[in-house]
Image: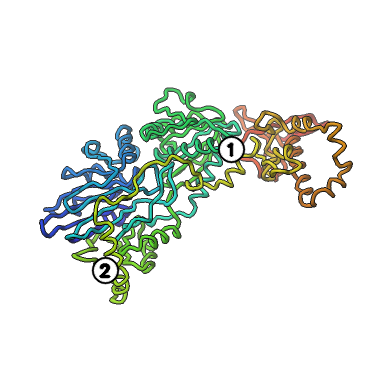
């Protein structure tokens, strides 16, 4: 048996690879394309006497299936998990012109969902394994026979070791001889994901109409996290998934109590409501359902647009509503990539989904043969035995092979039967937000704030109740109005203060002065209480300043604040309350100036 590979799009996304398995005994070549990204043309890669046997689709993100239709030939089968196949089906049912897709041909008929070992040819078989990254995403173990021995390649696809919407991450306990490893990395993902969820929750709790725009599978991921958050906390938010996101949600058979799926809607008002979250695609609201919904709310100063993107499109950055952007590229950090390689201890590491310096930095990084060429040449990995790259020196070749031969023999014995158990791509029943990549401590702090953004006192704090309205940052108190300071039970800070008047029996045990109270607790806790009380007062009474009236024309009157420090704490589109009084008792004074 001879095994070789091509990078199918080395100067584009570099996520696609063509594998060849040449069986000398039967004079037969099995050709397998892993993903069909931008710029892939198998007609240019295959010889006149070669045929495409299969396409392995790791997940339903656009950069991995953009040319799927044009590369489907020779009655090849497209293998994918049930979830990925279903997501592609929903794309076939919608308008793909916006994404410049090529889904021509008999893609629907060629799709075959698989969960277990599947034979491609007499000596080559495949098995999908969990890969995190996106709902239903997978890598593929590709097993080939050489005589009585069997060996195993892993095409990781885009992966994470953390979960994705309940689906497990990449398993590292699998015996692997060679890995085609995606090295796209993102150390910022947990922070970005937590920030997006935190902003969505805070804006919805504040009563804003929230529209989160995302791709189909990312939208499903967000809805899953928001519902899981509702199940594990006392803060429930109604979530509506709309358009294609709803179709994918239903297709993947999610059933969550706080999520409603509406694939078709006549009136945006049917799915946009204050205090709730609507998730729709595409990820930037320039087409489809998200555009319709955004156009309906863009002039609403109390609404919020949260764009959750892959970075492939330019976000909308201005509107009358509040606009936020979060780039969610769900990849591992470099330390995780290194740990995965160390766990597998493969003979070969073929670097994918990176080029130039980003790919070359992995050369000589591991005790394996690392392949990171920037071309579409054909390279041999195995020819009646494992072969090293032509550019490595003899010392490196001996070092890798001397360590690996014993290990490989053991692997061949372990994986010599296709009956060996491998993890399957199945959604887990338990909810684990930390395993999804969320910073639960940060979210816990955010979710236990009142609707004005104030944080609760620590357990056992003497100011436990009243401190629930203390702002978490200096700017929060100034932004809050008197009507904003409302607890989850509907009471205001003043209500709670009045309800906490001590009884006669309680008064007898209370300190008679502030000094005695200070003696009863340490100075740091006492200072913290005073600071919180100051913030409560600021939140309730607001901030007094002066402003200049500016006539902007067309019936629009603007107020120009004279205190720049206050202006710095305000955001475009934010709704605030003002009190206009006479010059005798000014809060915001009207003056005769009309020029700014």
Q: Position of residue 539 (x, y in %)?
A: 72, 37
Residue behind mark 1 = 202
Identify the image quadrant of residue 300.
top right
Q: Position of residue 518 (x, y in %)?
A: 83, 48
At x 26%, y 50%, the residue is 419
3D distance between C-alphas at marks 2 and 1: 54 Å
Quick one: SS at disc 2? Answer: loop
Q: Which mark is residue 388?
A: 2
Q: Counting other residues with Cα less than 10 Å from the Cα at mark 1, is it few (<14), some (14-19), or many (20 or more)? A: many
156 and 114: which is toward the camera = 114
Quick one: label 2 or label 1, which is nearer the N terminus? 1
372 and 465: which is toward the camera = 465
Residue 98 appears in view = yes
Residue 556 located left or right of residue 343: right
Looking at the figure, which quarter contains the N terminus?
bottom left
Q: Which mark is residue 9?
A: none
Q: Is residue 297 above or below residue 186?
A: above
Q: Position of residue 167 (x, y in %)?
A: 41, 44
Kindly report which numbered mark, 2 or 1, lies closer to the viewer in this rendering.
2
Quick one: SS at disc 1? Answer: helix
452 and 39: which is toward the camera = 452
* Colour setup of the view: rainbow
């Amino acid at each position: 048996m001879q095994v070789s590979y091509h990078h199918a799009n080395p100067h584009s996304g570099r996520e696609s690879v063509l594998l060849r398995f040449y069986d000398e005994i039967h004079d037969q070549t099995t050709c397998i394309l892993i993903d069909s990204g931008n710029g892939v043309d198998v007609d240019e890669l295959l010889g006149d006497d070669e045929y495409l046997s299969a396409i392995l689709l790791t997940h339903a993100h656009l950069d991995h299936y953009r040319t799927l239709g044009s590369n489907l030939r020779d009655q090849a089968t497209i293998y994918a998990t049930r979830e990925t196949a279903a997501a592609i089906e929903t794309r076939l049912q919608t308008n793909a012109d916006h994404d410049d897709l090529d889904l021509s041909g008999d893609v629907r008929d060629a799709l075959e969902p698989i969960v277990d070992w599947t034979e491609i040819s007499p000596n080559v078989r495949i098995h999908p394994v969990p890969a995190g990254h996106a709902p239903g995403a997978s890598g593929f173990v590709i097993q080939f026979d050489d005589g009585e021995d069997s060996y195993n390649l892993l095409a990781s696809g885009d992966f994470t070791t953390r979960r994705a919407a309940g689906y497990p991450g990449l398993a590292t306990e699998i015996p692997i001889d060679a890995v085609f490893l995606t090295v796209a990395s993102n150390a910022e993902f947990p922070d970005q994901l937590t920030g997006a969820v935190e902003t969505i929750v805070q804006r919805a709790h504040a009563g804003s109409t929230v529209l989160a725009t995302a791709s189909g599978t990312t939208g499903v991921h967000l809805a899953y996290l928001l519902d899981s958050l509702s199940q594990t906390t006392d803060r429930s938010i109604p979530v509506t998934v709309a358009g294609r996101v709803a179709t994918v949600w239903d297709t993947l058979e999610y059933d969550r109590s706080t999520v409603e799926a509406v694939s078709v809607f006549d009136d945006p008002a049917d799915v946009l409501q204050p205090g709730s979250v609507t998730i729709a695609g595409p990820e930037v609201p320039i087409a489809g359902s998200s555009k319709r919904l955004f156009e309906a709310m863009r002039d609403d100063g109390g609404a919020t647009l949260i764009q959750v993107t892959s970075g492939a499109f330019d976000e909308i950055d201005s509107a009358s509503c509040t606009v936020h952007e979060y780039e969610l590229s769900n990849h591992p950090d470099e330390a995780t990539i290194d740990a995965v390689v160390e766990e597998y201890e493969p003979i070969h590491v073929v670097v994918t989904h990176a080029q130039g310096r980003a790919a070359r930095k992995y050369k000589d990084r591991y005790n394996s043969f690392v392949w990171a060429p920037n071309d579409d040449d054909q390279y041999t990995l195995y020819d009646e035995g494992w072969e090293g790259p032509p550019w490595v020196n003899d010392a490196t070749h001996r070092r890798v092979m001397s360590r690996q031969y014993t290990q490989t023999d053991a692997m061949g014995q372990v994986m010599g039967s296709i009956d060996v158990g491998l993890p399957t791509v199945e959604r887990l029943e338990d909810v684990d937000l930390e395993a999804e990549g969320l910073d639960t401590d940060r979210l816990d702090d955010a979710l236990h704030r009142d609707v004005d953004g104030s944080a609760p006192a620590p357990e056992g704090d003497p100011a436990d109740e009243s401190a629930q309205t203390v702002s978490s940052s200096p700017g929060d108190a100034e932004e809050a109005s008197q009507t904003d300071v409302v607890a989850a039970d509907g009471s205001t800070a003043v209500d709670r203060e009045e309800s906490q008047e001590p009884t006669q029996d309680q008064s007898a045990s209370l300190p008679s002065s502030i000094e005695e109270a200070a003696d009863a607790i340490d100075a740091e806790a006492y200072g913290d209480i005073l600071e919180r009380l100051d913030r409560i007062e600021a939140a309730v009474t607001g901030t007094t300043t002066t402003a200049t009236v500016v006539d902007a024309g067309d019936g629009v009157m603007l107020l120009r604040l004279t205190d720049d420090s206050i202006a710095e704490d305000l955001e475009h589109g934010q709704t605030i309350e003002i009190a206009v009084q006479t010059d005798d008792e000014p809060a915001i004074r009207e003056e005769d100036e009309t020029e700014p």
